[in-house]
């Protein structure tokens, strides 16, 4: 493996982890409640890429393409997790409301 490829893969791993963390924080904010999760994921990826562009070793364009490909390949899991958490939260709210209605 070339040295640039090694640095590229390491950079992608670190920035992707930060992107995932930002995504899960941002999706819980009220102003992002109606933003489609795929759009929010893309916004987070673009934000983190721009914030860390000065740390890129090697060709920026090659790394950008590799980073976006990595995000496309792996973000589906994070989006599904977010959907599952929203569904669980909605179920819990419905159950709580039903229980309160029965008690009242």
Image: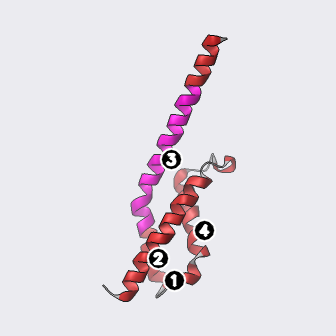
The residue singled out by tag 4 in the image is 47
- Residue 12: % across, % down: 45, 73
What secondary structure is found at the residue carrying circle 4?
helix
Which SS does the magenta portion mostly show?
helix
Mark before the other along the chain sequence, 4 or 1: 4
Q: Earlier in the sequence, mark 4 or mark 3?
A: 4
Q: Which residue is mark 1?
A: 56
What's the CA distance linking mark 4 and mark 3? 19 Å
Q: Which residues are magenta?
A: 70-94
| Residue wearing tag 2 | 11
The answer to if 32 sits in the magenta stretch is no
Numbered circles on residues, count: 4
Where residue 19 sits in the image (x, y, percent)?
A: 53, 64
Q: Which residue is mark 3?
A: 82
User: Residue placed at 63% from the left, 15% from the top?
Assistant: 101
Distance CA(mark 4)–CA(mark 1): 15 Å
> Residue, x 49% and y 64% (percent of image)?
17
């Amino acid at each position: 493996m070339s040295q640039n490829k090694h640095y590229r893969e390491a950079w992608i791993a670190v920035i992707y982890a930060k992107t995932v963390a930002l995504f899960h924080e941002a999706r819980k904010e009220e102003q992002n409640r109606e933003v489609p999760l795929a759009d929010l994921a893309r916004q987070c990826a673009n934000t983190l890429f721009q914030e860390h562009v000065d740390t890129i070793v090697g060709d920026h364009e090659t790394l950008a393409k590799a980073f976006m490909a990595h995000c496309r390949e792996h973000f589906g899991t994070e989006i599904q997790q977010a959907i599952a958490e929203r569904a669980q939260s909605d179920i819990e709210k419905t159950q709580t409301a039903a229980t309160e209605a029965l008690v009242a």
